[in-house]
Image (spheres, rainbow, N blue to C red):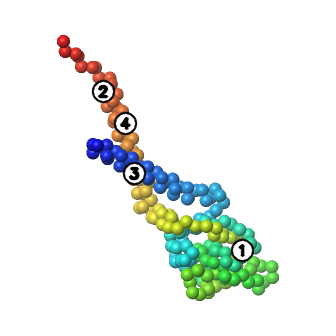
């Protein structure tokens, strides 16, 4: 087998693998939304043992009244907690509101944490995302794609490869047409 043929087979295999990976990532980005699910990437270790850093969790919006002890939710802790990013923790207590008719007070805890979170909170909305499933490690792809340099490479490299393959096919087609239109050599008598 020639080196050119081997290079072509390796290139075709690489393109196929890249297309499969791109299709899977695209499906993980768009299909959950079509199914009414939210997705979050776990960036901390407080839920280790249940799902690890880099997991992609899927959540469904449920009425706050349907939340139960043991549910895992993603929420923004109260402002006085000092935490400014979303947290995904398990509900460990639901207490009646001190103000009649108001939303209940919730307490949460990360599965890997020894202590219950030091704050109580109510949910301002009538619905809340509740974890319904997760895929381990896939979130690392989303974390990587949040870096603009990596995103440019992820888009740019395949685009350059496609452009080079198109250019190659264009040159081959032009030379083939030139060969076909060239006069046949005269036969010797």
Nearer to me, 1 or 56: 1
Structural distance between the alpha carbons of marks 4 and 2 = 14 Å
Structural distance between the alpha carbons of marks 3 and 2 = 31 Å
Please report contact status of discs 4 and 1: CB closer than 8 Å, yes or no: no
Mark whose residue sits in front, 4 or 2: 2
Q: Position of residue 19 (x, y in %)?
A: 46, 51
Q: Position of residue 96 (x, y in %)?
A: 76, 83
Quarter location, residue 2: top left
Between discs 3 and 4, the one toward the N terminus: 3
Residue under pointer 2: 179
Residue under pointer 3: 14
Residue 143 shows up from this direction: no
Q: Quadrant of the C terminus?
A: top left
Q: Which mark is residue 67?
A: 1
Between discs 3 and 2, the one toward the N terminus: 3
Structural distance between the alpha carbons of marks 1 and 2 = 73 Å
Q: Position of residue 26 (x, y in %)?
A: 53, 55
Q: Which mark is residue 170?
A: 4
Question: At numbered mark 2, what does the secondary structure look like: helix, strand or loop?
Answer: helix
Structural distance between the alpha carbons of marks 1 and 3 = 46 Å
Is 20 positioned to the left or the right of 39 in the image? left
Q: At 65% across and 58% down in the image, what residue appears?
A: 35
Mark whose residue sits in front, 3 or 2: 3
Q: At 31% across and 31% down in the image, what residue appears?
A: 175
Between discs 1 and 2, the one toward the N terminus: 1
């Amino acid at each position: 087998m020639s080196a050119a043929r081997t290079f072509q087979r390796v290139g075709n295999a690489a393109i196929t693998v890249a297309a499969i990976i791109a299709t899977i990532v695209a499906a993980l980005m768009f299909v959950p939304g079509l199914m009414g699910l939210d997705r979050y990437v776990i960036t901390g270790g407080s839920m280790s043992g249940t799902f690890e850093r880099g997991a992609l969790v899927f959540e469904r919006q449920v009425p706050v009244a349907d939340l139960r002890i043991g549910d895992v939710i993603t929420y923004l802790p109260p402002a006085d907690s000092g935490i400014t990013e979303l947290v995904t923790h398990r509900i460990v207590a639901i207490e009646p509101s001190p103000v009649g008719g108001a939303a209940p007070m919730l307490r949460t805890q990360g599965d890997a944490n020894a202590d219950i979170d030091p704050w109580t909170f109510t949910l301002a909305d009538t619905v809340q995302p509740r974890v319904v499933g997760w895929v381990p490690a896939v979130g690392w792809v989303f974390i990587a794609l949040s870096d603009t340099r990596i995103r440019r490479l992820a888009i740019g490299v395949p685009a350059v490869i496609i452009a080079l393959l198109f250019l190659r096919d264009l040159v081959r087609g032009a030379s083939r047409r030139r060969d076909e239109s060239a006069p046949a050599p005269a036969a010797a008598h």
